[in-house]
Amino acid sequence: MTTLITGARGKVGQAVINRLHSAGLSVRAASAKPAELTVPAGVEVVELVLDRPETFQDALRGIRQVFLYPEPGGIHDFIKAAEVAGVEHVVLLSSSSVLGPDAENDPLASHSLKVERALADSDLTCTFLRPDAFASNALGWAYFIGQNMPIQLAYPDAQIAPIHPADVADIAVEALTGDSLTGRAVTLTGAQLLTFREQLAVLADVLDRDIPVVKITHAEAEEQMGQYMPAPMVGSLLALWAAASAEPAVIADTTQTLLGGRPARTFQQWAGENAAAFTQN
Ligand SMILES: NC(=O)c1ccc[n+]([C@@H]2O[C@H](COP(=O)([O-])OP(=O)(O)OC[C@H]3O[C@@H](n4cnc5c(N)ncnc54)[C@H](OP(=O)(O)O)[C@@H]3O)[C@@H](O)[C@H]2O)c1
């Protein structure tokens, strides 16, 4: 049985491809830009753009199972094409944000929620993985750290439980290869609550240098982030971090259980593995 992995250039997508391939399973890697993909020899590569239905048929031919990155544009057409192709199971890389208040009207959460709802209304068996913030979001600081610039944050004391993308990939592989997760929706977090300030202290320790943190106002952050992100997304992220400053994230014990009892990888581990990304600017 061949599994189709969408979003194959993504951190989780890549890790899932490598794990399934190493286990001797047949994988087809689907990306919006297949020419930019690096996959192990023997992995089939195909173009798939979720708002271009003409790319669906080739990608889905002979596929029974899909690991899906959430993209609401085109999801209804994709589901129809998957049903016609004979797909039986979809494992969705959703987000814990779908559980937040007013998720339907929140630009971050509604992205994943629309895809969850479309899948739930379909004939496909679905598994929803709902991770919290990824440890790899720290890569957003890489340029500034590489340039020896301070990190400016409106909510440096927001407490989150960042999850290592490799743990999300391990659990995705479990969902794709076993039946313990089939049909379930699971929330995934790291095992440790860390403020952004604490994450930066970990990075400073790993890089053996100071990383100054400067607290800025909400309005200043809005203006800065607005230069590279749509305004509704900025508002949503800032609201999330403001809330996490008042009330820390909740650690989901599901993660360790789903990792077979092994503790989740730590932010320290992620920082050690990715140190080079912060020194290459
Ligand atoms: N980041 C978080 O904190 C977080 C938390 C919960 C859920 N999630 C969900 O997890 C998914 C992955 O999030 P992510 O932030 O870590 O993103 P990511 O996996 O690094 O990349 C997301 C996708 O963007 C496309 N892409 C476009 N340009 C790219 C480039 N230059 N390099 C790599 N990929 C590129 C890729 O799809 P193609 O290969 O098809 O182009 C890739 O799979 C998201 O859909 C998000 O909803 C993220």
Image (cartoon, rainbow, N blue to C red):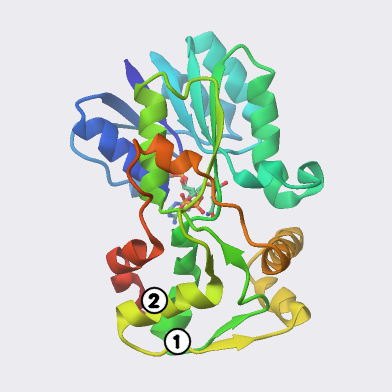
Element at label 2? helix
Front-lying residue, 31 or 249: 249
Q: Which mark is residue 211?
A: 1
Numbered label tally: 2
Q: Which mark is residue 172?
A: none
Q: What is the quadrant of the C terminus in the image?
A: bottom left
Q: Nearer the viewer, residue 19 or 157?
A: 157
Vertical position of residue 30 compared to residue 199: above or below: above
Return the residue nearer the eye: 68 or 254.
Answer: 254
Residue type at numbered disc 2: Leu
Dot 1 falls on a residue whose secondary structure is: loop
Q: Position of residue 17 (x, y in %)?
A: 31, 37
Contact flag, marks 2 and 1 (Cβ < 8 Å): yes
Q: Amino acid at mark 1?
A: Ile
| Picture quadrant where residue 225 is located | bottom right
Q: Is residue 203 visible?
A: yes
